[in-house]
Image (cartoon, grey):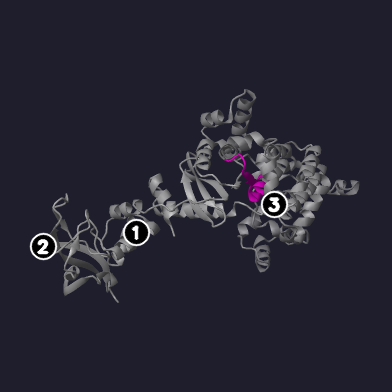
Amino acid sequence: MLLPHLGNVLVERVYREADGVVFEARAAAATARCPDCGTSSARVHGRYQRSLADLAVGGQPVVIRLEVRRFRCRVAGCARVTFAEQIDGLTAAHARYSPPLRAALTGIALALAGRPGARLAAVLGLRVGRDTLLQLLRRVPEPDVGEVAVLGVDDFALRKGHVYGSILLDMATHRPVDVLPDREAATLAAWLQAHPGVQVICRDRAGAYAEGARTGAPDAQQVADRWHLWHNLCEAVQRVVVRHSTCLPEPEPSPTPAQADEQPPRIDQAATRPETPATARLRERYAAVREMLAAGMQRKVIAARLGVHPDTVARYADAGSINDLLISKHRGSKLDPFKDYLDARWNAGCTDAVRLTEELREQGYRGTSRTVRRYLEPLRETGSPATHVPTPPKPRQVTSWMTRHPDEVSENKKMRLKAILARCPELHTLNGLVADFAKILCNRAGERLTAWLDAADAADLPDLNTFTAGLRRDLAAVTNGLTMTWNSGAVEGTVCKLKAIKRTMYGRANFDLLRKRVLARP
């Protein structure tokens, strides 16, 4: 009952040594079968002792010292003259581990691989090296792919920015069916041709996967993932907002003639403040990028020549002006929510920064009195009354207000967005298009997509037209994604699990080992 794998042996002695527990045993059967001809034999040719490692008992390593007999085959024509007996459920040719121990070590290898697995095994009283665990892992048989009707495909980074692979998922069972060494169209097409029967392919909007699906499974329906569609729309919306960023600041109220005569003009401290090294460097890089683009150079070449990331070059190239980049780099202050109160107290005659700081702390301010003193310093120099102008929102904030669910946007932000839309007709039109696309996506009303594309093109927003042109190139898959129930959510979740597996191997494992751990996991 306690040691079922020892049911076919006679345990003659159990004792403890310095390094563990020892079981001395021998086979209970009087005969053994020849592995070649299958004939039973009772003629013993000799004996020898064989050691097998077994599962720990009480946290102590266990060794089974088994007395093994070598028999003579009784068949004269058999090529095998002598043979060693094998005990069912306990031994196999050349095996050094018992079946229960081998299963346990294989499970540890699947979960943790080499070094982490060896450390856990040592805690459990199992002696094994990291290389042995990796060998056990590589010998695990891969599960049969079977017939896959709905396939999900997505890429993952083996080395971010350089080497990528692809993971394939059975969307009906959420089970990984294969891991490919790259994300090329030919590789996916070859896999699809070797595994016919795929009817639906869920993918992102990568052109390589679209081409591979068309080549390998021309009759299958392609489904573009809804999350990627919304993500691409948000990127296009942010580009439009950046292009119209001059509409984001609130216009300053024009003073009446009497007020203009009474009040001296207030000095704009931001305009007179010397330019920081970071801002100067940004201006130089922006000018260099624009000059190289005008000369016809490619973005990758510009990035290599300037020593910056290609995404940085793309951000400079897509910006309408240097002001778009400067606005996006603005950082808020802890004092921003309390500036209206400070202005009112200053105009009421309170000029003590320490006292004002104490009052602000009662309202939740967590900054220092030095910040308050810096804010009041220009007012002391000019002697003018305080007129705080709210900091304009960042383009990314406005994009968030336009693309988030209305219930998740506060009333204050809704009012600020409404004021911005009233000042900018282009953003007002864009906001309506975003709301219409959200309804199509949430209600899976893909039949309305063509009409939405026509309305978006009629709005004549260049950054949005780039998004709509991409949808038209992949119209069938996008329409399916906005109509059918399938999406790539399960694939994205599996990619997150794959990344966790890769991190447990410190990012140094070969592709075959990573593939084995993904496919063989229970």
* Mark closer to the chain start, 1 or 3: 1
Residue 224 shown in magenta: yes
- Crowd around label 3: few <14 · some 14–19 · many ≥20 (10 Å): some
Q: Helix, strand, or loop for circle 3?
A: helix
Q: Amino acid at mark 2?
A: Val
Position in image of residue 314 (x %, y %): 61, 36
Tally the numbered discs.
3
- Crowd around label 1: few <14 · some 14–19 · many ≥20 (10 Å): many
Q: Amino acid at mark 3?
A: Ser
Position in image of residue 217 (x %, y %): 58, 41
Q: Who is closer to the viewer here, 244 or 111?
A: 111
- Residue at the extreme bottom: 1
Residue, x 68% and y 61% (percent of image)? 352
Kindly check if marks 2 and 3 are in contact, taking CB atoms under 8 A apart as contact. Answer: no
Q: Who is closer to the viewer here, 335 or 331?
A: 331
Q: Who is closer to the viewer here, 442 or 367?
A: 442
Q: Who is closer to the viewer here, 406 or 135?
A: 135
Q: Classify residue 372 as left or right of residue 142.
A: right
What span is colored magenta in the figure? 217-232
User: Looking at the image, can residue 389 be seen?
Assistant: no
* Mark closer to the chain start, 2 or 3: 2
* Mark closer to the chain start, 2 or 1: 2
Q: Helix, strand, or loop for circle 1?
A: helix
Residue pointed to by mark 3:
400
Distance Cα–Cα, label 2 vs label 3: 83 Å
Q: Which quarter of the rendered picture does the C terminus lie within?
A: bottom left
Position in image of residue 416 (x %, y %): 77, 53
Residue pointed to by mark 2:
44
Residue 192 vs 16, above or below: the answer is: above
- Residue at the extreme front: 76
Disc on res. 106:
1
- Residue at the extreme left: 46
